[in-house]
Amino acid sequence: MINEITTVDAIHSLKPAAIWVLRGDVLEWLDSEQTEPTALELSNEVTRLQAVYDSQAYARTRKTKYDLLNQDEMRYDDIKNSTTTWVDAIDAIKAAHPKPAA
C-alpha cells in the first residue's frame, strides 16, 4: 500500500490545534491565534513527512508478515520440542525485509 502525504497531513503536523478549511487546493485560515503556514513551509513539511513514512516501509512490511505467524504457539512448540522454528521465522522475515542503513 502506497501512502501519499498531503497538505492536510502537513497542516496537522505543523499546527495541530489550528482552525482552517481546505476547499480543493485553497486553504482558508480561520485561526486568529496561530499564523498560517506558508506554501513553502507546507511543501517542506509534506516532503519531510513523506520521507519519514517511506523510511518505515520495512517496518510496516515486517509487521504484516509477523501478524501472519502464530507466534505464541510457535514459541510454545519450540520450548516443548527444543526447536527454533519461531526464531528462524523471525530471522527469515528480517532477512527478507532488512532495516535500511542509517
Image (tube, helix red, strand yellow):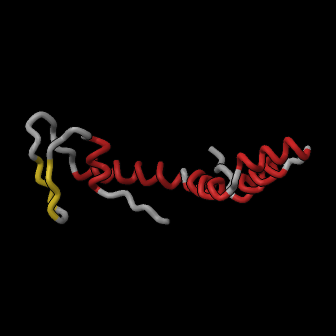
Residue drawn at (90%, 46%) of the image: 81
Q: Nearer the viewer, residue 62 or 82?
A: 82
Residue drawn at (32%, 43%) of the image: 13
Q: Residue 30 falls in which quadrant of the image?
A: top left
Left or right, 25 with respect to 9, comes to: left
Image quarter where the C terminus lies is: top right
Residue drawn at (59%, 51%) of the image: 59
Left or right, 58 with respect to 17, comes to: right
User: In the image, residue 19 lies at what x, y percent?
Assistant: 15, 44
User: In the image, residue 22 lies at what x, y percent?
Assistant: 17, 57
Q: Is residue 34 above or below residue 93?
A: above
User: In the image, residue 45 lies at what x, y percent?
Assistant: 34, 48
Q: Is residue 59 above or below residue 26?
A: above
Q: How many marks?
A: 0
Q: Residue furthest right?
A: 82
Q: Nearer the viewer, residue 53 or 46?
A: 53
Residue drawn at (60%, 52%) of the image: 63
Q: Nearer the viewer, residue 59 or 90?
A: 90
User: In the image, residue 21 lies at what x, y percent?
Assistant: 14, 53
Q: Residue furthest top?
A: 33
